[in-house]
Amino acid sequence: MKTPQRNRLDQAGMSLIEVLISMLIFSFAILGLVSLQVNAVKVSYGAEDRTRAALMANEIIAAMWTKKTLSPSLTSWQTRLADPTVSGLPGSATGTVSAADANGVVTITITWQEPSTKTADNYITQVAMP
């Protein structure tokens, strides 16, 4: 028994449609990878800013531990923190240091805002003073 032959005109253009659909799927995959890369870069910048804030907090902690007082170091530290070329934080960062509580715990808060966001980022750390 003979198998029926299909007419080539019935299939005209099907390969072109298959190629176009596969290119469309491939394009969406590439766009997804590019979006993933953009988000990874944003997250790495945020991590870098948090690291810089931690370094600035450690700087005032070291000054408090060595001098056993806060008053002479606080204003110069806040000035360095507000300068982006010194602190490395975007915008004009601010820092507050709370007075020691009954247990001798001091809270340090550093706040900065990325130019691309509307919300401020915070880094808060606590240290027990001797």
Image (cartoon, rainbow, N blue to C red):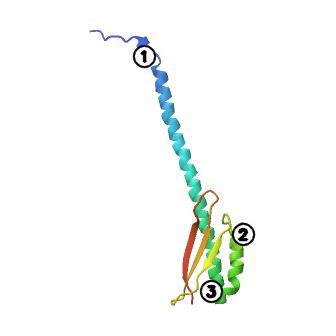
Task: Establish if 62 lies above or below 119.
Answer: below
Label 2 sits on what residue type?
Answer: Asp
Quadrant of residue 41 within the rendered picture: bottom right
Quadrant of residue 67 within the rendered picture: bottom right
Q: Residue 21 location in percent, x, y?
A: 47, 29
Q: Secondary structure at mark 1?
A: helix
Q: Residue at x 51, y 38 (%)?
A: 28
State the quadrant of the C terminus.
Answer: bottom right
Between discs 2 and 3, the one toward the N terminus: 3
10 Å crowding of disc 1: few (<14), some (14-19), many (20+): few
Q: Residue furthest front?
A: 118
CA distance separating discs 2 and 3: 24 Å
Task: Give the label on residue 11, or none.
Answer: 1
CA distance separating discs 3 and 1: 82 Å
Q: Nearer the viewer, residue 48 or 80?
A: 80
Q: Nearer the viewer, residue 101 or 34?
A: 101
Quadrant of residue 10 within the rendered picture: top left
Q: Nearer the viewer, residue 89 or 36?
A: 89
- Nearer mark to the viewer, of 2 and 1: 2
Between discs 2 and 1, the one toward the N terminus: 1
Q: Residue at x 73, y 66 (%)?
A: 85
CA distance separating discs 2 and 1: 69 Å
Task: Establish if 127 lies above or below 46.
Answer: below
Q: Residue at x 57, y 71 (%)?
A: 123
The residue carrying mark 2 is 83
Task: Give the label on residue 65, or none.
Answer: 3
Q: Residue 51 location in percent, x, y?
A: 60, 68
Task: Establish if 129 lies above or below 77.
Answer: below
